C-alpha cells in the first residue's frame, strides 16, 4: 500500500510528497534482547541528541548541520527526517515531505531504543508533523527540547507553511526548553510585527515567552545595519545579550540550525542553559571565522565548514594531537646568546627545558643564518616530537615550513597571521604578540590559535619593549577570544602573581632568561613548573 499526500497551500508550490509504499520499506527486525544486551554490556554513555529536521542537499543546514555540529562537540546525533529538500547556495528548488506516519515511525524507532538526552527540532513542515511529534514525544522522557522554528531558508525560500504557526503556539512551544527564532520567524510568530532593533528583539523575546517556552533566544544574524551579530535570550525574568563581531562572509547558510544543535549538544553534556548558549554562540562565530575564505557553490549564500577547527586539532602532518591551550602553561623561548654563554647547544637547551616540564618550545634565533636555523629546528623538532611537546619557530615561516615545525609565532611587524595561515594551512599553530585589545581581536580574526601578551614586566631580553604591566595584561586577556600566554620579565618570583590576575583564558607564562640564563635549565624549569601547577591547583580548588 503506498502513502501519498497532496498539499494545496499556495506556499507549497515547490513542495511535493514522497510516497512510501509498504513493499519498498525494508523491515529491519532487531530482537529486543540483543539490543538490551548490547546496551547492558556497554558502560560508556555518550551524550545523545536526536535531531528532527529536514535534509539539506547542500549539506550546510538541517540534518546535515546538526550531525556535523554534534560531531564537532563530541556528542552522538540520531536523526528523524521530516522532509527532503533540493537546495543549494542559490535557494530551495524543491521540498518533498516525509509522510507524517513515517515521521512517527522514525521517532518511535529512535526513542524506543536509544537513550536520547535532548531533542532538537528544525524543519517541521506542516501542522500534522508538529502534532505527531508532540504526541509521540510526550510518551518518552528526555532532558530537554530545543525548538528551532524553521520557516524559511537563509535564501528566503519557504520551508514551512503559515498554518504551522498555530501548531507551534498551541502544542510545541509550551514543551520547549528553548526556542530560537531568527528575526523573520519571531516576526511571524508575533503576527508580522517589524523587528529592526535590539530593543525590538527584547520585546519579541518577552512576547514569545508568553507562548510557554522556558527560554527564548531571538537571533540577530539578519539585524539590519548592525556591526555586531547580537542575539537576545529571555528566561522569563532576565535578558541576556550575546554579541559577536559580525564576520564579513557569504558563508552563513545554516547558522541557525548550527546554533540550535550546538545548544542541544551542550545541554546533553550537562551544561546549564546560559552556558550552552554561550558555547554555541562562540562555536558559530569560530566556525564562520575559520570558513570565511572557503567557496562552495556559486550563489549568494554559501555554507560554512563545521569541522575546519576540528580538522586543525587532529592533524596527521604534525604532532599526534592538535594544539591545546594547556600547552601554553610553561612556554620556553630559546636564546642562542644565553645558551652560548652557558656552553650549551640549542637542542641541549630544548631537551633540558622539556625534561624540566616545559610544555611548548619556541626557537627564537635572530642571528642564525637560514641554513643553520633550519638544522637547529630539525634537531630540536626530533626532541620535541619524542616528548609530544609543540615546537614553534619565531617569525621565520620559511624555517617552519622547511623543518615541518608545529607552527610559528609572529609579532605585529612580521607577516600577517592570515598570510601565515594560508602558507601553513589549518593544521599548524599560529601565535601572535599583542599589546592591545584591538591587536588581540585582529589576531583572532586572522585565525591565530593563541596570543602572547606583554612585556608584562621590564626585560633585558627584548630591547625597546614597552611594558604593559599586570593591568595591561588583564585588559588584553578580557578582550581576547583566544588563549593567552604572558611574556616579559617573568620568572619564579613573579609567575604566581601573573597567573593570579583571575582571567580564565590566561593559560601560562613564556620565559627566556629565567630558564636559559641559568646554570641548570632543568632545575630552573622544574621550579617554575611547580610554582605554576601550585597556582593552578589552588585556583581549581576555589
Ligand atoms: N555574519 C555573521 N557573523 C557572526 N555571527 C553571525 C553572522 N550571521 C549570523 N550569525 C549568528 O549565527 C546565529 C544564527 O543566527 P541567524 O539569524 O543567522 O539564524 P538563521 O537565520 O535561523 O540561520 P539559518 O536559517 O541560515 O540556519 C546567531 O548566533 C547569529 O548571531
Ligand atoms: C532542511 C533545512 N532546514 C533548515 C534550514 C534553515 O536554513 C534549511 N535551509 N534547510
Ligand atoms: Mg534558521
Image: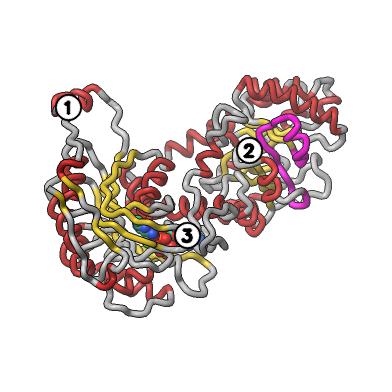
Please state if 358 lies on the left or on the right of 265 as rendered: right
On whether residue 373 falls in the magenta region, the answer is no
Residue occupying image coordinates x 15% and y 55%: 132
Question: What residue is disc 1 on?
Answer: 36
The CA distance from mark 2 to mark 3 is 30 Å
The CA distance from mark 3 to mark 1 is 44 Å
Residue 441 x/y as whole percent:
61, 56
The CA distance from mark 1 to mark 2 is 44 Å
Q: Quadrant of ligand 1?
A: bottom left
Residue sitting nearer the eye, 162 or 418: 162
Residue 365 sits in which quadrant? Answer: top right
On whether residue 405 falls in the magenta region, the answer is yes
- The answer to whether residue 349 is seen in the rendering is no
Q: Secondary structure at mark 3?
A: loop
Count neighbours of disc 3 (C-alpha within 10 A) and say few if under 14, some if 14 to 19, many if 20 or more: many
Question: What residue is disc 2 on?
Answer: 428
Residue sitting nearer the eye, 21 or 217: 21
Colour mapping used in the image = secondary structure
Mark positioned earlier in the residue sequence (1 or 2): 1
Residue sitting nearer the eye, 30 or 195: 30
Question: What residue is disc 3 on?
Answer: 89
Residue occupying image coordinates x 35% and y 66%: 152
For the magenta stretch, what is the residue range? 394-414
Residue occupying image coordinates x 50% and y 52%: 304
The image quadrant where one finds the C terminus is: top left
Amino acid at each position: 500500500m503506498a502513502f501519498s499526500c497532496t498539499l494545496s497551500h499556495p506556499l507549497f508550490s515547490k513542495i511535493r510528497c514522497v510516497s512510501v509504499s509498504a513493499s519498498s520499506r525494508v523491515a529491519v527486525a532487531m530482537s529486543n534482547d540483543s539490543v538490551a544486551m548490547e546496551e547492558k554490556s556497554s558502560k560508556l554513555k555518550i551524550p545523545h541528541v536526536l535531531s528532527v529536521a529536514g535534509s539539506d542537499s547542500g549539506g550546510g543546514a538541517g540534518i546535515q548541520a546538526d550531525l556535523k555540529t554534534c560531531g564537532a562537540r563530541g556528542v552522538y546525533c540520531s536523526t528523524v527526517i521530516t522532509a527532503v529538500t533540493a537546495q543549494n547556495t542559490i535557494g530551495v528548488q524543491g521540498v518533498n515531505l516525509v509522510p507524517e506516519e513515517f515521521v512517527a515511525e522514525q521517532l518511535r524507532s529512535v526513542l524506543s531504543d536509544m537513550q536520547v538526552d535532548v531533542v532538537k527540532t528544525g524543519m517541521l513542515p506542516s501542522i500534522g508533523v508538529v502534532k505527531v511529534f508532540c504526541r509521540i514525544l510526550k510518551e518518552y522522557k528526555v532532558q530537554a527540547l530545543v525548538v528551532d522554528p524553521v520557516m524559511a531558508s537563509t535564501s528566503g525560500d519557504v520551508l514551512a507553511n503559515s498554518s504551522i504557526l498555530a501548531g507551534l503556539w498551541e502544542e510545541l512551544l509550551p514543551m520547549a526548553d528553548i526556542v530560537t527564532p531568527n528575526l523573520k520567524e519571531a516576526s511571524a510568530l508575533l503576527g508580522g510585527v517589524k523587528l529592526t532593533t535590539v530593543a525590538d528583539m527584547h520585546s519579541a523575546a518577552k512576547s514569545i515567552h508568553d507562548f510557554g517556552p522556558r527560554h527564548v533566544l531571538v537571533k540577530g544574524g539578519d539585524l539590519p545595519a548592525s556591526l555586531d551579530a547580537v542575539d537576545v535570550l529571555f528566561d522569563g525574568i532576565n535578558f541576556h545579550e550575546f554579541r559577536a563581531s559580525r564576520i564579513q562572509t557569504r558563508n552563513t547558510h545554516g547558522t541557525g540550525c548550527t546554533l540550535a544543535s550546538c545548544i542541544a549538544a551542550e545541554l546533553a553534556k550537562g551544561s546549564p542553559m546560559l552556558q550552552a548558549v554561550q558555547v554555541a554562540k562562540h562555536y558559530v562565530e569560530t566556525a564562520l571565522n575559520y570558513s570565511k575564505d572557503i567557496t562552495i557553490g556559486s550563489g549568494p549564500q554559501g555554507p560554512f565548514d563545521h569541522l575546519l577547527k576540528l580538522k586543525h586539532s587532529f592533524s596527521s602532518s604534525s604532532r599526534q594531537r592538535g594544539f591545546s591551550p594547556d600547552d601554553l602553561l610553561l612556554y620556553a623561548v630559546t636564546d642562542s646568546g644565553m645558551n652560548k654563554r652557558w656552553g650549551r647547544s640549542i637542542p641541549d637547551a630544548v631537551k633540558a627545558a622539556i625534561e624540566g616540564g616545559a610544555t611548548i618550545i619556541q626557537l627564537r634565533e635572530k642571528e642564525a643564518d637560514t641554513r643553520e636555523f633550519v638544522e637547529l629546528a630539525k634537531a630540536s623538532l626530533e626532541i620535541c616530537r619524542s616528548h609530544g611537546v609543540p615546537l614553534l619557530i619565531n617569525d621565520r615561516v620559511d624555517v617552519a615550513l622547511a623543518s615541518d615545525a608545529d607552527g610559528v609565532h609572529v609579532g605585529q611587524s612580521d607577516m600577517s597571521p592570515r598570510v601565515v595561515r594560508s602558507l601553513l594551512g589549518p593544521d599548524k599553530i599560529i601565535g601572535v604578540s599583542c599589546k592591545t585589545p584591538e591587536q588581540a581581536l585582529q589576531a583572532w580574526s586572522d585565525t591565530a590559535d593563541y596570543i602572547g601578551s606583554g612585556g608584562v614586566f621590564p626585560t633585558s631580553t627584548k630591547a625597546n619593549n614597552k611594558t604593559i604591566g599586570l593591568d595591561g595584561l588583564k585588559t588584553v586577556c578580557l578582550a581576547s577570544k583566544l588563549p593567552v600566554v604572558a611574556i616579559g620579565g617573568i620568572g619564579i618570583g613573579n609567575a604566581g602573581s601573573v597567573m593570579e590576575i583571575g582571567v580564565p583564558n590566561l593559560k601560562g607564562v613564556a620565559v627566556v632568561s629565567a630558564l636559559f640564563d641559568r646554570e641548570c635549565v632543568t632545575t630552573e624549569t622544574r621550579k617554575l613548573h611547580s610554582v605554576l601547577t601550585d597556582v593552578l591547583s589552588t585556583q581549581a580548588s576555589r
